[in-house]
Amino acid sequence: MSNVRTKASFAAPIVAASKWLNGVTFAPERPLINVSQAAPLAPPPDSLRHAMAEFVQYRTEAHLYGPVLGMPELRTALAERTARIYGGAVTAVQVAITSGCNQAFAAAIAATTAEGDSVIVPTPWYFNHKMWLDMAGVESVPLPIEADLLPDPDRAAALITERTRAIVLITPNNPTGAEYPADLLRAFYELAQARGIKLIVDETYRDFHSQTGAPHDLFADPDWDRTLIHLYSFSKAYRLTGHRVGAMLGAPELLDEAEKFIDCVTICPSQVGQYAALKGIETLDQWLAAERDEILDRRAAIVEGAPALAAKGWALKGSGAYFAYLAHPYDMPSDLLAPHLVREAGVLLLPATMFVPDSDPTGARHVRVAFANLDRAGIATLVDRLTALSI
């Protein structure tokens, strides 16, 4: 008999969307534009690949189990980097390295909830967060975002019950691209602190934030780890998606509980991926700054294409990090429009129905575009194909 909770969750959206390509051919002069997934398609820079190769060839520990919560050197390096970016004090014992940021979220939920508890999640949500909460037997309480794509702390406060264990925020946001202002994050932090629950902040795309300096000041609170659980990903920063390296920052006693979960799932993170992340922190600041500049330029290209889209009835609702969130003009729900776009426009994107509850009508009107793998010319072609579509 299948696990009822797993069966009740939905199919993995990226996998489901890839099936729309079955039986569809694309002419060489009009190849598919795939903006469905937010994962770098390029490999890590040469210097990092060479370091990884040497580690594999010459270091025995590359092939052995390591500490469940990660390499001590990497935990220390990330603690120091986090303190440098945000201010405040962060130590290695407050850092756990995980097999990707999805595992960091799963470990955080395993360490803070029991079956039947609830977690407040702004909608549109990141679908893997929702899927894991379903499979953990934890209720996802939707918090619809406002017209500016930001969640309201007062509305969140009204949703807190005796079963609430955490509020989850993603900034820059997946799927909308919205960057949450520092004062908004502070308001949610103080709400969670006052109500005795956790604030889980996923900053997978932090390195591509348009703001210079610290995105918030939450680490400046000397007792930040009593309330804040911070999630991060090396995958996007250093193009290490296949090596699965993420992190969770929180109280040492919380990490003790997360350690039990990680030990049962992967035992330890990838040694090669961790070594690459460490070398990235140590040597790739300038390279990463250039990557950020390129992503911000691609975001600017999306904004520059907005008037042409608007002339055809599309509306750019949000853009940031890897994502643009668009309202479409058609009398067709987005879950039907998206496969239609594959066949008629050669564009693979995700419908917003994958990011909201079935009862939320906004899903039918919106789509997510993950534009980070398109250069300016590719973005211009995407805009041309969307504006040329006739339904």
Image: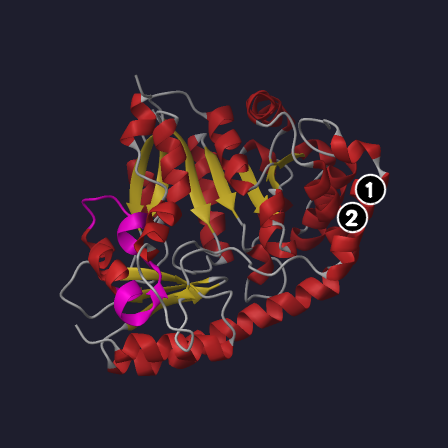
- Residue furthest right as drawn: 58
Q: 10 Å neighbourhood of mark 1: few (<14), some, or many (≥20)? A: few
Q: Is residue 170 left or right of residue 280?
A: left
Which stretch did the figure color magenta?
Answer: 341-360
Say what secondary structure mark 2 lies in.
helix
Vertical relation: 308 (above or below) 19: below
Query: What label does residue 159 carry, if any?
Result: none
Q: Is residue 8 left or right of residue 224?
A: left
Check contact, mark 1 vs mark 2: CB within 8 A.
yes
Give the labeled residue for mark 1. Answer: 57
Q: 10 Å neighbourhood of mark 2: few (<14), some, or many (≥20)? A: few
Residue drawn at x 18%, y 58% as measured from the top left: 333
Return the residue nearer the eye: 102 or 146.
102
Rendering coords of residue 75 (x, y %): 72, 38
CA gap, disc 1 to disc 2? 6 Å
Give the labeled residue for mark 2. Answer: 53
Q: Quadrant of the N terminus?
A: top left
Q: Quadrant of the C terminus?
A: bottom left
